[in-house]
Image (spheres, grey):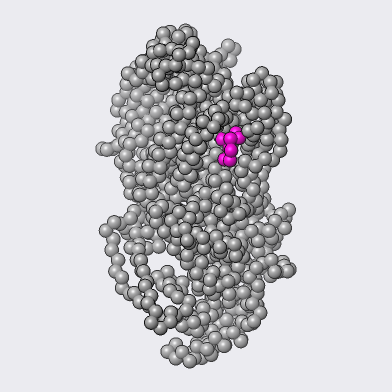
Amino acid sequence: MCRRDNYPLFHEVPSGGAEVVVYVEMACNGLFGAGRGGDIEPPDPDCSYTLSECGVSTFDAEAWQLLQRVTFLEGCATSLPVGSTLKQTALHCANRVINAVDVLDKQTYGKGLEIVDKSFLQSGTSRPLDSSEFTRTGVTPMVFAIGNCHIDTAWLWPYAETRRKCARTWSTQIRNMEMHPEYKFVCSQAQQLEWVKEDYPSLYQEIKEWHKKGQFLVTGGTWIEMDCNMPSGESLVRQFLTGQRFFEREFGAPCDVFWLPDTFGYSSQLPQIMRSAGIEFFLTQKLSWNLFNKFPHSVFRWEGLDGSEVIGHFPPADSYNTSAKVDEVIKTVQDNKDAGVLNAAMMLFGHGDGGGGPSTAMIESLRIMRNNVPGLPEVVVDNAERFFEHAAGRYSELPRWVGELYFELHRGTYTSQAMIKKGNRKAELSLRKADLVIGIFASVRDSASEHGVITEFSDLLSYCWKLLLLHQFHDTLPGTCIRPVVEEAEAGHRKILEYAQRVSNDLLFGLTGITSSAPRVEERERENEKLLVLFNPNAFLRTPLVLSVSVGVDSETLKCSTVQQVDKETSLVVVEDVPSSIALTVSPKTMRELQEDYRCSIVHRGDRLYLKNGQLKVEMGLDGRLYSLILRGAGNVPDSPNFVKGCANRFVLYDDVSLFWDAWDVEAYNFEKCYPVDSAVSFKIIETGPLRASLQFEYVLGSNSRIMQSVSIESFSNLLTFENFVTWHLDRKMLRVEFNTFLRSPTASYETQYGYVQRPTHFNTSWDAAKFEVCGHRYADLSERNYGLAILNDCKYGYSVRDSLMRLSLLRSPKSPDDLCDMGDHQFKYALLPHAGSFPCVDVMRSAVAFNQSAELRVFSGNYVAEDGIGEMFALEDENEQQYKGSVLLDCVKKAEDGYDLVLRLYESLGGTETVRVKVSSRLGFKRAMLCNIMEENTGELEAVEKSDWLTVKIKLSPFQLQSIRFPRE
């Protein structure tokens, strides 16, 4: 019955003469898809299978019971240590059964059962299933057997097949519950439950009925079992917000356990986000796959970046797919690293990954072990919450792990499928903007006539968020899935961008006070006038700022004399004196004259190209390499040293052959075999200023791959920006760009969700060496006391910093499970940001934010009516009521999930205690403010002061703290 090619059709034989129709479906694939030549290879569309046997058999209960008992004896005999009394007893008992039973004579089966039950098992004294009935002595180990089925939402099969897998698996588990009243099954991932609700409504009703009986249990707390490395902080928040709301709405209560058995590393901000979602417990087993180091704990307190704590558990059997056999129960006990504190652990049983769940044989195996067998641990079938209640009782004694749970494997997932990662970043940013716009619109246009528009667009954004969360599944966003899943994710990201842009454009247009309808007869009517509108989505803005505008704009329209024409469609202009706040400004002030010191210039001299603006002096070679990067001083401050040691901006190809998990892994030994890309084959000066100076280099990578790179500086900016257009068709190669610096530090800093983490730049220990490739978000920084250098990017996640050498991973070309991974054309940007002083550095954080989502300048021309725009909406001030220049970021503004309240989400980004005044424009109509958690549940009232067209609240944030504020609609 452990085989997955048979199924019990009936619990009772139909009466004579009854007609039974049986539908049989055969899938042409194995457990891990239909790969050509291997389990994780790309699917073979031409594979064929032969149906060699198909029949109906009568179930022999007595023979099956005997088989289960003999299997149990075999497990005891082979798994227990030499010298164990139980081991010897099992061997002796098995020998007696073999002597007594003739497999061809059914009459002897009963004798075999009698031998086992009388001489080995203490029949009639089966232990209770529910752990609450135990009076724990703490001496005998306890194993919590948890029935589950980890169904990958997409992997070696598409999403559509997962919908069917869920139905097949869960209907099977309900049949198990009918046969075994003591059996409990745990199910996670709200998305999968919603699919079953949509596709199989009658099955979904059965699930809810069995949930009420306490057998079909839901857990997890998130929309799907997501990747935890690359999603933004807001994306992780939405996983919990969307998931917990679903569980509460559909099953009456939110979840207490974050159930994530399989993903590729765990962000250090998860404990804080979990606690804010009402979750105190966390389960995974993936770190048991570490290649370098064994994680030292089985049950522990996990402390996050901000100091929040949850209880974590790694089931010692090191699997979420156990078969509930004796050896796995023994391993659960023997490998419990914290048995001295808590002599109990979970064992997850059931066929997983591709579906199926626990079988009848697994349930029977546990039933046998629940008898009082001397020498075996106490085995109970229960839920995860009950185990964690036991663990919470020993909270103060549990060991503590501080910081991220770095996974020492699958580091290639930070880079594989670059288009998915780019689509994810762009979709996150587009939804951030759309949330902001609809939140403002719902506040200022809260009238009955606008409710339909607000509801329509809110529903559209909710759909987009669910779609984004789906594609952050831990085999989709990491790029470890087959081609059909890749194509669906890329299409999903395009749809999100389209819908979010529609929301932003339609509602922003209304908020400007500009209408494109026929001119109204008003005093401020302007026919055929060109209007300039600035939208700043960040609560900071460093001005003057160079921005691009559309075609048809001249210096007269912009009221300035300095306009740089980029091409037929785009011009550059300098905007100045814009409020450092989230604002929508009609006709912002533009700079009339650009002083000579701020102009960009470029000079070609010999084999060098020299770029300069008011902040930087740059020396490039005709080969495309960067030879000098100097931060210019001001006043009595001298210029910085050259940040470059030797050369930088060097493209390097690496052999990229993994030991097994192709798209998943990059190996440390690959650093030993690399090929610097040849010098640029051509260069061109594209722009000579005054607002931007840029160069273009072309590199050839073999016969069918090339890089076109634009290198540029802008006025008033200390960024050196590299925009890349890559045609990529290499085989099993990895492309990185390297920057050799003069800086030395034992650690480098990498942005993570709501903060940053530091990781070693050396290989002193195996724990250090394991981090040869790490995940970071919008920046990585290497600093010493006086100076630092940051790499910013717009869609990359893989970094490697060793000693003074900084690397950014760009593209890969693995061949399984998608042999077209990264093949084709790519466009991406990165930039260098030299800075004075060490890290943490506010300028690095803010520059990285703006590099990904900066202010926008738009021009409207035609028959427009210009009213007063909404102006400044949200701003931050310090305690002295001055412009805030610290480390707190206003990351999210959104309409509340229920109603028309407004929710703001802030966080401290650099590890310091900060007090900040949050200002909301009185035009939004709010009078009160409440602290709330990420579930948007109020946790306390804030003192709100109305003054000078603002409603202001003051809050204090501890290092890396995430805080939400809710402004209720009166």
Residue 389: tell me if it is visible: yes
Q: Residue at x 40, y 60 (%)?
A: 32
850 horizontally vs 966: left or right: left
813 horizontally vs 573: left or right: left
Q: Residue at x 68, y 31 (%)?
A: 928
Q: Residue at x 35, y 49 (%)?
A: 484
Within the image, what quadrant is residue 945 found in? top right
Q: Residue at x 55, y 50 (%)?
A: 246
Up/down of 35 relative to 105, above or below: above
In the image, the segment drawn in magenta is: 895-902
Question: Is residue 901 rendered magenta in the image?
Answer: yes
Pick the residue in front: 546 or 168. 168
Magenta span main SS: loop
Position of the C terminus by quadrant:
top right
Indicate the position of residue 263 as horizontal and vertical percent values: 51, 51
Up/down of 316 relative to 628, above or below: below
812 horizontally vs 74: left or right: left
Indicate the position of residue 101 as horizontal and vertical percent values: 49, 89
Up/down of 17 relative to 206, above or below: below
Q: How many marks?
A: 0
Residue 770: tell me if it is visible: no
Indicate the position of residue 662 as horizontal and vertical percent values: 39, 51
Pick the residue in front: 890 or 938. 938
Within the image, what quadrant is residue 620 found in? top left
Pick the residue in front: 687 or 392. 392
Indicate the position of residue 407 as horizontal and vertical percent values: 53, 49
Question: Is residue 116 rendered magenta in the image?
Answer: no
